[in-house]
């Protein structure tokens, strides 16, 4: 049923949320809040990546002697799979604006499976690295584990956000709040996946 001109839109109904999303002339406040948060995170990662190359500058051996350069294949494949989930969350955000709850659930659910698998692979790779060099032994180890650990923590947060959106969209539907939350989730993963590429290139720079 179409809305009567001048009549308030019911934000808590999926149909009302869809109409409101299409009437907006600007992004909702929640979207801007997520954007500002991600700007601060990008700054943090930029600082850590700059620190990595600053520490590398002027030394003769990077990584230090006794620490093998990273192998390219496994982290590159894992990161490629993670970046591919940007397509899934894009579909979810688009489906949310159309009120297609089923597509949102399937898209976010599949993205979660891939993202959780990526996190598992990366934790296993980091555990393997810890057997060969410590974060306390060298400046390389310190910045290496700080950079990767911070990124993995952001992936974990993203996975928890996936589960939150899945739970509430399944139970409450695409109300205005959860429609916006789905779009925010997509924005979060766009930025985190972009950072994943930068972290990967930094991590593999001695091997490239």
Image (spheres, rainbow, N blue to C red):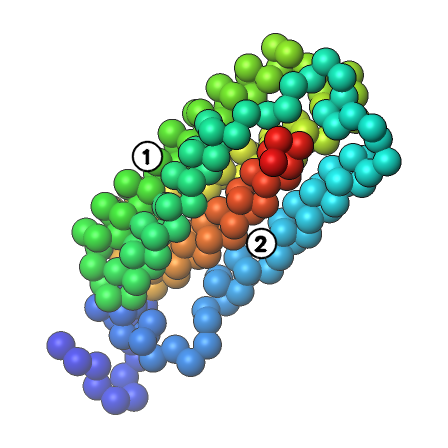
Q: Which residue is mark 2?
A: 38
| Mark 2 or mark 1, earlier in chain | 2
Give the residue at x 75% y 28%: 62
Give the residue at x 35% y 57%: 90
Question: Is the residue 202 above or below the residue 190 in the image?
Answer: above
Q: Is residue 96 visible?
A: no
Residue 165 position, x and y percent, is 35, 47
Inter-mark Cα distance, 2 to 1 = 23 Å
Disc 2 element: helix
Q: Which residue is mark 1?
A: 113
Task: In the displayed orientation, state which residue is furthest to the left.
Answer: 1
Residue 72 position, x and y percent, is 52, 30
Task: In the displayed orientation, state which residue is furthest to the top.
Answer: 131
Q: How many marks?
A: 2
Image quadrant holding the C terminus, namely: top right
Question: Is the residue 202 above or below the residue 31 in the image?
Answer: above
Q: Is residue 27 visible?
A: yes
Q: Quadrant of residue 148?
A: top right
Disc 1 element: helix
């Amino acid at each position: 049923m179409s809305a009567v001109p001048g009549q308030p839109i019911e934000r808590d109904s999926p149909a009302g949320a869809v109409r409101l999303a299409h009437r907006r002339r600007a992004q909702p406040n929640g979207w801007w809040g997520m954007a500002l948060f991600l700007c601060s995170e990008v700054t943090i990662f930029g600082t850590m990546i700059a620190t990595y190359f600053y520490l590398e500058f002027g030394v003769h051996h990077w990584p230090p002697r006794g620490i093998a350069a990273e192998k390219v294949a496994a982290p590159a494949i894992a990161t490629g799979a993670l970046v591919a989930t940007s397509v899934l969350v894009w579909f979810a955000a688009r489906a949310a604006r159309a009120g297609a709850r089923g597509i949102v659930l399937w898209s976010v659910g599949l993205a979660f499976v891939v993202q959780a698998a990526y996190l598992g692979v990366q934790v296993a790779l980091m555990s393997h690295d810890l057997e060969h060099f410590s974060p306390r032994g060298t400046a390389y180890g310190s910045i290496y584990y700080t950079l990767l650990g911070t990124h993995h923590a952001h992936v974990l947060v993203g996975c928890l956000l996936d589960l939150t959106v899945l739970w509430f969209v399944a139970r409450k539907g695409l109300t205005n709040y959860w429609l916006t939350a789905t779009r925010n989730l997509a924005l979060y993963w766009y930025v985190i996946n972009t950072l994943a590429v930068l972290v990967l290139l930094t991590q593999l720079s001695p091997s490239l």
